[in-house]
Amino acid sequence: MSEFVYDPIRIEECWQAAWESEGLYHAAENTGKPKKYVLEMFPYPSGDIHMGHVRNYTIGDVIARQASMAGFEVLHPIGWDAFGLPAENAAIKSDSHPATWTYANIEKQAASFKRMGFSYDWDRTVKSCDVDYYRWGQWIFLKMWERDLVERKSSPVNWCPSCKTVLANEQVVGDSQCWRCKSTVEKRELEQWFFKITNYAQQLLDDLDDLPGWPERVKTMQANWIGRSEGAEVDFTLCDVDGEPTDERITVFTTRPDTLFGCTFFLLAPEHPLVARLVAGTEYAEAVNAVVASAARETAVERQLGERTKHGAFTGRFVENPVNGQKVPIWVADYVLMDYGTGAVMAVPSGDERDFGFARQYGLPIVPVVVAEEDAPRYEGAVLGEVPQEVDWAEAYNGPGVMINSGEFSGMTGGKASEGMNAVTAWLSQRGRGRESINFRLRDWLISRQRYWGNPIPAIHCPDCGLVPVPIEDLPVVLPMDIDICKGETLADHPEFYETTCPSCGGAAKRETDTMDTFTCSSWYYLRYTDAKNDSLPFSADNANYWMPVDQYIGGIEHAILHLLYSRFFTKVLADMGMMTAREPFTNLLTQGMVKLDGATMSKSRGNVVAPEDMIAKYGCDTLRAYILFMAPPDKDLEWSFEGLEGMFRFLSRVWRFVGDVADEVATGNGVAASGDTAAKKLHREMHRVIAKVTDDVARFQFNTAISALMELTNSAYEYRREVAEGTRDLALMRDVAETLTLLLAPFIPHMCEELWRVSLGGTKSVHLEAWPPYDPSACLADEVELAVQVNGKVRGKVIVPADLGEEDIIAVALEAVGPHIEGKEIKKVVVVAGKLVSVVVAG
RNA sequence: GCCCGGGUGGUGGAAUGGCAGACACGGAGGUCUCAAAAACCUCUGGGGGAAACCUCGUGCGGGUUCGACUCCCGCCCCGGGCACCA
């Protein structure tokens, strides 16, 4: 019976203080060691930490600590994403200032992170609401402006009526909801600030191929969001009121130029600038204007209602199809989007579901069919508008097929990326009536927010000079603190902030009062960590080039598009500015799953939160850390279990007692120096097998199976002690196992291992400065192996054979073992899988 | 509708094409104890059997293979993302 009682709280508090005073976790440049940059997404200081934080930061901490033991110089920083709306809302609620709330929560979270024993370099901490940080955000904004990547323009934007600010497209989630408050957003035409992320659309798409260390899911989501479509622009000729061709052309974008002969009508978006002119003063004006007005009225609420009814009206005018001279009617239709392509569309009802539906609804022609499915009715020779009587026309066909009714192109293959598509595009191109074209779904990033608690946009509105950037030497534009947010004030209510003079002409001018989207702050914080105290630049190229890219990034899947896309954009822009060489910020990405209770996400509003602090107080943070890693692979959701946590505490106690008992036995010399008997050999082999397994599992982030393997080693160690009497145990082996167990567990349960290492085992320096144990592949091999013997695919026996036995001998032994199952039968085949099994195939 | 994930005991979860269910939780029984707790030991997928052992079994149906949770084809269900993007 051991007198070693595991007292986690005492141990943890003791070593946390020791590590801090020893400065154990400072990262340094140019140490000669290979570098590793391990980063977790920085938290928003929303209050107490929750289990999601525990999981995220524990995963990162294990990776960082293990890398450090494996010989890397590790950069593992932490900071806070501190601007944003929740601070404003909380301030209003508690009648205080957002800064008060924010800094108090940062203190609280920092204390919790320290209590979790995370190995951060606290000297590099960044808080995005500190002027020392956000001034460099302004600096980057101005440099982007210089490079023509900043634009102020009027466009239909998303407005959240609850947050009282505009939002980026990426911040509209689900069915047109604000990502923060889940209110339904409205469309408003407003003049706003944008970053021209669309200039980088192709690169952002292409470079996803350079990220093999990212989950496929995240890359697919980004690729879909960027939404590249290949096709062509086609110029249709506008006809006058008498139907005669004019010189004016209307351009459409299509991904299917091969279907051009199937165009039976033509559509304009309700917002298209041409619409008003086409119908002005005509009998069609009333119906068309009604469609335009109802589209303008249509809110996001209506738009989200599943399958929307299409609305349209004839304009009374026609266009001429460049490919066949066919005149087709121009309609206005509310399913045509003004902000994608050209706002005009050629309708091919036989090949497009939406056009088909619209044609049905308004009695517009559907034939000719121009791309026919093999083995399907061809409708050769069908003319415009003629629907064959005998056909029950069910739906449009948009797949690949043979082109028919398409003049000289008939007979070619049609479809996406087809021969016919290229031929038609080339034909148009030669005649100046069209051209290859690529469209992206991605929109420019709307970055201005009509809110106080953010980074002020460094721009000045001058009545004479227009928009003028704040000169770089005048930075920072400091966010004033004397604002009464509880009265709903913003910067726009403070003349002492916005009244200024124009840097260009010196006349009276007005400062921009919008602040930047908080996502601008989080788009480059990982670069600031590389050089956190630089007061002349956001970061130096030397430091960025030394540490970047981040080798391992860990965070929630909710940022699959938002933060990860914006950060990739910033990285490319900063690289183009010559600020550094990395063109992708994060080489490897791990998206951790959620922590759930009874199948539901833990949340304050649901009242199903398990507070980390409570668990730490009861079991210590080492148990919590090991538990949260053990219960599920890191990328899967994790179901919380109090019993599981209790079980992990039992495991830690077992390790504690084992190492303590061994240390005692070794100290008193109660045993033999080295026995080399079967039991010792077996334990020795198990130890090397586990070193190999844990090393491999950590590299693949399989922390759950790494811990399982360590449990197995512990179980084996206990078995050895049970089976070999006290006084006859192999002391060298026992000490080796105790040390190995302590070293391998150190990244997971750093405090207990430190206590065991420095106190029980008499280590002279921190366990976290020791080398990760190497393993001997030959030591993993057993003298004898057990083989399963299968007959016709079923296991019918087991044999134990010397590991180096030849194949012929193995077969002989195996056949003997399954004698009754093969007796009198013809052996057709025998397969020997080294170290695993023998498979015998018999006839009958 | 399209694109991703995922479906394995009572539960969380293991299995480079090679003995399915490692490890753990829960459960049952036991040792120690006056007793309890702790600790330790044994058993624990279903069905059959006293046992040896047999048999079924990784969402469903096929296929490839000596051998399939794993690979291929066709479905079903659950979770997520996108969605009138021409």
Image (cartoon, coloured by chain):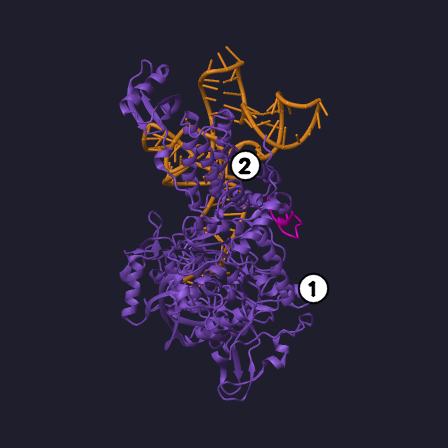
Chain colours: A purple, B orange
Q: Point out the frontmost of discs 2 and 1.
A: 2
Circle 1: is it few (<14), some (14-19), or many (20+) Cα within 10 Å?
Answer: few
Q: Which residue is mark 1?
A: A93
Chain assignment, label 1: A
- Say whether residue A111 is magenta: no
Look at label 2 and name its amino acid: Gly
- Say whether residue A600 is magenta: yes
- Quadrant of the rendered structure where residue A294 is? bottom right
Q: Is residue A264 visible?
A: no
Circle 2: is it few (<14), some (14-19), or many (20+) Cα within 10 Å?
Answer: many
Q: Nearer the viewer, residue B71 or A47?
A: A47
Task: Provide residue A759's location: percent of width, then percent of height.
Answer: 54, 43
Answer whether labels 2 and 1 touch (C-beta < 8 Å).
no
Tell me the number on the disc at residue A813. Answer: none
Task: Provide residue A352's location: percent of width, then percent of height.
Answer: 42, 57
Task: Provide residue A432's location: percent of width, then percent of height.
Answer: 30, 72
Part of the protein shown in magenta = A599-614
Q: SS for tag 2?
A: helix
Task: Provide residue A494's location: percent of width, then percent of height.
Answer: 63, 79
Q: Is residue A427 above or below residue A118?
A: below
Q: Which residue is mark 2?
A: A660
Q: Earlier in the sequence, mark 2 or mark 1?
A: 1
Q: Is residue A741 above or below residue A25?
A: above
- Quadrant of the rendered structure where residue A574 is? bottom left
Q: Is residue A59 visible?
A: yes
Q: Main secondary structure of the magenta part?
A: loop
Q: Nearer the viewer, residue A762 or A804?
A: A762
Quadrant of the rendering where the N terminus of chain A is positioned: top right
